[in-house]
C-alpha cells in the first residue's frame, strides 16, 4: 500500500490548499508518505508526524532528510500539543483504523489553531478503490466467509456522507468532502497478485490464511475477471475521499 500512499499524498496536499509557512501535524504517519509530500508540495514551517507504532517512526526518521520534519511515537488520545496550535492537522489513510474516529476528530480539532484546518483522507473501500474491490469481489465469489473481512463493509466511515457528518459532529465548519483519484497500473497479473502474497493488511492476511488449493482458486478467478489492456496490462483507478473542515 505504501507506493499508493506516496502517489496519492501530493494530490491530497494540493487539494487542501493550505497556505505556506504553516505548522502541520500528521496523525498516523506510518512511513512518512504524507509528511514528505507536505514538505515537497506544501512549503510548511514544520511537520510533526506521529504514529503509535514505533517501528514506523524509526523508519521515517531514518529516511527523512528535511530539517522541517520530525517524527514522534504518539497515538490518538495523546497526540503532541503545540503552543498556539497547528495551522493544519491532517491524517492519510489512518482515520478508519483509529479505535474511535469521533474522538480522533475531536482531538485533532482541539490541537488546531483558530482558523486552522483539520483534514483526513481515506480510501473508498466500498467502490472506487478498484484493485481491492476486484480482490474482495473475487474472494467472496469463491468463499462466502470472505465478505466479513472486506474493508468495504468493515469501514463504514469511508463514505462521503459519513465523513462529512463526522467532521460536522466534531465541531468543524465549512466542511467539504471530495474524491481524489490516482491511476493504479499493473504490468501483468503477476504484478497485481504478488503484493497480496507477502504484504500486511486484511487482504494479504486473508490470502495467507488459505490453503494452496483455495489460493489457486482465488488467483484463477481474479486472472479470469480482471480486464486487460494492450500487452496484458491491468489499468485500474484508486479513489480516496478527502475531507476538510475549519476551526471557527
Ligand atoms: C494504513 S496506515 C497509513 C500510514 C500513512 N499515513 C500512509 O498513508 O502511508 C495507518 C497508520 O495508522 C497508524 N495508527 C493506527 N492506530 C493508531 C492510533 N490509535 N494512533 C496513531 N496512529 C495509529 C498505524 O500504525 C499506521 O501507521
Image (cartoon, rainbow, N blue to C red):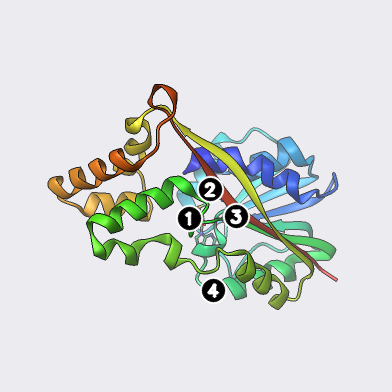
Q: Earlier in the sequence, mark 1 or mark 4?
A: 1
Q: Position of residue 142 (x, y in %)?
A: 23, 55
Coordinates of residue 218 in the picture (x, y in percent): 24, 47
Dot label at residue 53: 1
SS under mark 3: strand
Q: Earlier in the sequence, mark 2 or mark 3?
A: 3
Q: Compute the Cα span from label 1 to label 4.
A: 17 Å
Say if mark 4 contacts mark 3, CB within 8 Å: no
Nearest to viewer (mark 4 / mark 3) = 4
Residue 208 on image: x %, y %: 24, 49
The CA distance from mark 2 to mark 3 is: 7 Å
Q: Is residue 101 visible?
A: yes
Q: Quadrant of residue 103?
A: bottom right
Horizontally, residue 182 falls left or right of residue 56, namely: right
Label 3 near ligand 1 (CB < 8 Å)? yes
Q: CA distance from mark 1 to mark 3?
A: 9 Å
Q: Which mark is residue 57?
A: 2
What residue is at 80 percent from the left and 45 percent from the top? 45
Earlier-in-chain disc, 4 versus 2: 2
- Cβ of disc 1 within 8 Å of ligand 1? yes
Where, by quadrant of the figure, is residue 151 drawn?
bottom left
Q: Look at the numbered discs 2 and 1 and tell me whether their residues touch, using CB distance below 8 Å.
A: yes
Give yes or no for contact between labels 2 and 3 (Cβ–Cβ under 8 Å): yes
Element type at mark 4: loop
Q: Is mark 2 within 8 Å of ligand 1?
A: no
Q: Residue at x 86, y 71 (%)?
A: 248
Q: State which mark lies toward you, 1 or 4.
A: 4
Position of 41 with respect to 96 (left or right) is: right
Q: Mark 4 — residue?
A: 100
Q: Mark 3 — residue?
A: 50
Amino acid at each position: 500500500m505504501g507506493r499508493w500512499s506516496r502517489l496519492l499524498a501530493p494530490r491530497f496536499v494540493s487539494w487542501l490548499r493550505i497556505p505556506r509557512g504553516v505548522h502541520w501535524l500528521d496523525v498516523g504517519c506510518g512511513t512518512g508518505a504524507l509528511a514528505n509530500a507536505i514538505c515537497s508540495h506544501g512549503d510548511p514551517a514544520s511537520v510533526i508526524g506521529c504514529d503509535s507504532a514505533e517501528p514506523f517512526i524509526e523508519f521515517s526518521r531514518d529516511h527523512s532528510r528535511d530539517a522541517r520534519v520530525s517524527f514522534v511515537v504518539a497515538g490518538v488520545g495523546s497526540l503532541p500539543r503545540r503552543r498556539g496550535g497547528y495551522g493544519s492537522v491532517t491524517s492519510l489513510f489512518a482515520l478508519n483504523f483509529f479505535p474511535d474516529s469521533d474522538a480522533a476528530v475531536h482531538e485533532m480539532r482541539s490541537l488546531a489553531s483558530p482558523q486552522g484546518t483539520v483534514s483526513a483522507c481515506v480510501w473508498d473501500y466500498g467502490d472506487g478503490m478498484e484493485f481491492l474491490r476486484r480482490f474482495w469481489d473475487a474472494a467472496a465469489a469463491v468463499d462466502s466467509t470472505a465478505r466479513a473481512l472486506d474493508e468495504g463493509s468493515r469501514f463504514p466511515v469511508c463514505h462521503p456522507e459519513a465523513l462529512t457528518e463526522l467532521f460536522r459532529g466534531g465541531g468543524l465548519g465549512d466542511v467539504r468532502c471530495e474524491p481524489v483519484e490516482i491511476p493504479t497500473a499493473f504490468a501483468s497479473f503477476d504484478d497485481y497478485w504478488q503484493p497480496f502474497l507477502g504484504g500486511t493488511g486484511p487482504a494479504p492476511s486473508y490470502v495467507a490464511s488459505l490453503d494452496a488449493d483455495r489460493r489457486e482458486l482465488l488467483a484463477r478467478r481474479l486472472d479470469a475477471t480482471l480486464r486487460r489492456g494492450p500487452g496484458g496490462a491491468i489499468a485500474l483507478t484508486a479513489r480516496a475521499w478527502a475531507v476538510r473542515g475549519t476551526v471557527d
